[in-house]
Amino acid sequence: MSHQPLDSSPKTILVANRGEIAARIIRTLAEMGWRSVAIYAEDDSHALHALQADVAVPLAGSGPAVYLDIDRIVHIASEHHCDGVHPGYGFLSENAQFAKACEDAGLAFIGPNAETLNLFGDKAQARALAQQCGVPVLRGVDQQVTLAQATEFYDTLPEGSAMVIKAIAGGGGRGMRVVHERQDIEAAYQRCQSEAQTAFGDGSLYVEQWAPNARHIEVQVLGDGKDCVHLFERECTLQRRHQKVLEIAPSPSLSPELRQKLYDAALSMANKAQYVGLGTFEFLLYESNSQLQFVFIEANPRIQVEHTVTETVLGLDLVQLQLQVQPQLKTGIGLSQLQLEQLSYPA
């Protein structure tokens, strides 16, 4: 992968994660000449990320829960004179409280700020932002709904339509059910609420009309707080239980005109939010009145598991780009210097 010239002063970054993504971030930090600080649970003492980092600090306790201790992680980062914290994906990567705690401690949070995380962490708010930007969305309710309100919305749908119930704080297909029959609404609502509370600590739900046989397209975006660029798209239509199975780049489903409309939609929302770091804006593509239509469904304000697909196609290191454009790290590098708008898919 190509590497751009960097600021002359090395930085120290705490990686607030474990496993594959932590090792992947540590590798890029080493290639950049920056220092890495890893954290590890007692049962991860021999994990790859703990062995690869320049410094590895143990956490008290075992299991995933210890990687959620905001106060302890921020304390370790400050104690080791870190310039910033990279949350990876999962764990605290979309936690606005964590981003704010890093900011308050003078640490760069490698990702969007707390306000942006709150915005995109609330799927109903994200829908509202899309509509402000003129980006189409599925018919739905842009706020938390009760069981009665969900039922009322279902009754307004055209005959033969289905409704999808989704967790407001959700993702990854958890807290999500498609309802085809009115008598199934209550059971689906309660199941979604229980799953959402367990997975995200928030049982709030919202509803949308279901788009059957839709294709799933996601646009990779990078922002520096002033400008945003797209890094093209990936298609993840092949799924099982709303979980992605296969990612393809470029998407074989898009005409040049429709592809550009998706880029424009993603960038209009990202620019409106003054987006910082990597993010993925997800859309559904479906046929309506014999024409292909697209709608926005959600944004993931973090690096994604699937970022390596984009890296492979474009020959870029997305983690490095994410670090370079983070304003709080003061690298002196922004999107204009990187000239990413000149990228194109390989022939």
Image: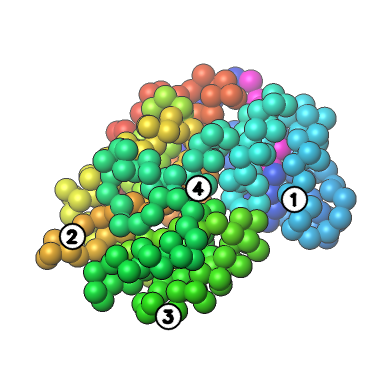
Residue 120, image x and y in percent?
Answer: 48, 44
| Residue annotated with mark 1 | 67
In the rendered structure, does residue 13 fall within the stretch colored magenta?
Answer: yes
Spatial CA distance of label 2 from label 3 is 32 Å
- State left or right for residue 309 relative to residue 34: left
- Say few, some or many: other residues with alpha carbon within 10 Å of mark 4 (under 14 / 14 to 19 / 20 or more): many
Question: What amino acid type should be assigned to the residue bearing mark 2?
Answer: Leu
Question: What amino acid type should be assigned to the residue bearing mark 1?
Answer: Tyr
* Outermost residue to the left: 290
Q: Nearer the viewer, residue 223 or 311?
A: 223
Residue 138, image x and y in percent?
Answer: 31, 57
Q: Which mark is residue 180?
A: none
Mark 2, secondary structure of its residue: strand
Whether residue 175 is visible: yes
In the rendered structure, does residue 188 fall within the stretch colored magenta?
Answer: no
- State left or right for residue 20 relative to residue 274: right
Spatial CA distance of label 3 from label 4 is 28 Å
| Residue annotated with mark 4 | 122
| Residue annotated with mark 2 | 292
Spatial CA distance of label 1 from label 3 is 41 Å
